[in-house]
Amino acid sequence: MSRTIDYYFSTISPWSFLGHAPFMAMAQRHGAQVAFHPVSLGPIFAESGGLPLAQRAPQRQRYRLLELQRWRLKRGVDLHMAPAFWPFDCRLADQTVIAALQADLPVDQLLPRLFAGVWQREEDLADPQVITAIADAAGLPGRELVAAATGEGASAAYLANREKALEADVFGAPAYVLEGEVFWGQDRIELLDDALSSGRAPFRPEA
């Protein structure tokens, strides 16, 4: 019987980008279903004790840059450390993914292209014309999706994803939730792989 992984991510997150391809490959290898949940990270940080990057201690900010370089090499991908249009308002990009999901359209090509747009191609993903072109290139109806992304349905789903994340004990992205067990960070994909391979019951916090 196929198992489902709830996948919480945001296009603004470099860690979501770094983990996306290996996570999707791992899920496909196990025949697992992926439930996509683009999520707004600012409120998640605020409610779970995290801090936006600019408010973190300098040594934490410097360490983040080291980790990005290590994982860029480990994953074998190009990644700009400080893209031209980052940080940016990621609601349009994230909600375009939601709009595609709500229209029962595949996001297999859209998501990698959105991530690449931020972290490799240095495109402005807050620009509706850029998002339209990206969706078109992914074989999706860009103009229609961007219009839907700014509508009430996508906005409500984006807010609902935040509530789902908090209820699931998610406090950052990417987070992969397997039947209630949270795996936070793209460096936990191997542990998620082990859990799926073993077929074990989900772990729960123990006092």
Image (cartoon, helix red, strand yellow):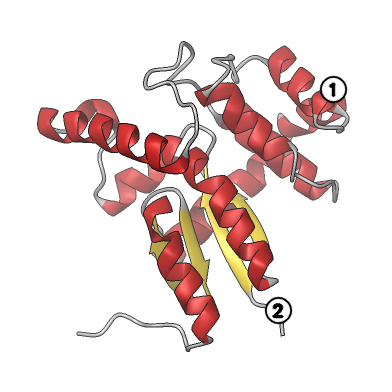
Q: In which quadrant of the rendered image does the N terminus lie?
A: bottom right
- Label 2: which residue? 2
Q: Position of residue 95 (x, y in %)?
A: 66, 36
Q: Position of residue 11 (x, y in %)?
A: 54, 34
Relative to 197, residue 19 above or below: above
Residue type at mark 1?
Answer: Arg
| In this rendering, position of residue 61 left or right of residue 167 | left
Q: Position of residue 194 (x, y in %)?
A: 46, 75
Decide which of 40, 194 is in the foreground and name it.
Answer: 194
- Residue under the point 71% across and 29% down: 150
Relative to 53, residue 133 above or below: above
- Residue under the point 62% across and 64% down: 27
| In this rendering, position of residue 205 left or right of residue 83 | left
- Residue under the point 71% across and 22% down: 131
- Label 1: which residue? 143
Task: Name the element at disc 2.
Answer: loop
Q: Quadrant of residue 6?
A: bottom right
Relative to 124, residue 27 above or below: below
